[in-house]
Image (cartoon, rainbow, N blue to C red):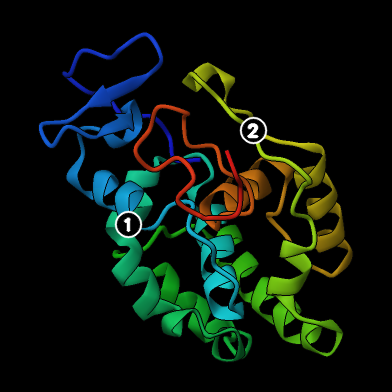
Amino acid sequence: MPQPQNTSRTDSQDGLVVGSDGLARPTWAASDPLLREYYDTEWGLPVRDEQGVYERLTLEAFQAGLSWATILRKRPAFREAFAGFSPDRVACYDEAAVDRLLANPGIVRNRAKILAAITNARATVRLRDRGGLAALVWSFRPDDTPRPRTQAEVPTRSPESAALARALRAEGFVFVGPTTMFALMEAIGIVDTHLLGSHRRGCSGLWPE
């Protein structure tokens, strides 16, 4: 999940902040307008298309060690640099393309993560004759979802995210550890870790309360 951000608001005991609009959000989504927009309109909604899953898998890998706000602010530049996250196009990136990306100040210029994006694009293309990336990722949807009342109750990994990480590594994917994969599962709606008091709880429509 996105990294918590500092806020000058007084947090309630359950980790929720009620905004001026009367809506309750977790602390990390309460103060930064960009994070608030992402939380209100995108995070936790189902993403089932190949390109959408590949984009979010790539961004989760780039986020490792950084704040999610940093990635969101750079997302337009990422989309431009990685051809709209088209797996076919990124799979064709060569060393010259890597050099161009390393010189691009709009993205995170980490060679290992850039190479991972290319490696994972190629693995995504290879998966198509066996159902595809999105189907593989969604096949690890658990039978139940967490129901956290407080931020401290939100897990950072699960047996399913560990199994997904193993399955993806077996297919040639990299930068897909269990914690990163749990963050992906949260982001694309496979699990719902919105706090029970949040106005976004249940927004995916997949988990009856």
Residue bearing mark 1? 41
Q: Residue at x 43, y 52 (%)?
A: 43
Query: In the picture, which quadrant includes the C terminus?
Result: top right
Q: Residue at x 45, y 78 (%)?
A: 82
Q: Amino acid at mark 2?
A: Pro
Q: Is residue 34 above or below residue 101?
A: above
Judged left or right of residue 20, residue 145 is right
Question: Which image quarter: residue 33?
Answer: top left
Is residue 76 visible in this depiction of the protein? yes
Task: Work out how far the residue at label 1 is from the one at label 2, CA to CA, in angstroms.
Answer: 21 Å
Q: Is residue 206 above or below residue 56?
A: above
Residue bearing mark 2? 146
For marks 1 and 2 on the same chain, the one whose residue lies earlier in the sequence: 1
Q: Residues within 10 Å of mark 1 (few under 14, many from 20)?
A: few
Q: Residues within 10 Å of mark 2 (few under 14, many from 20)?
A: some
Front position in the image: 43 or 108? 43
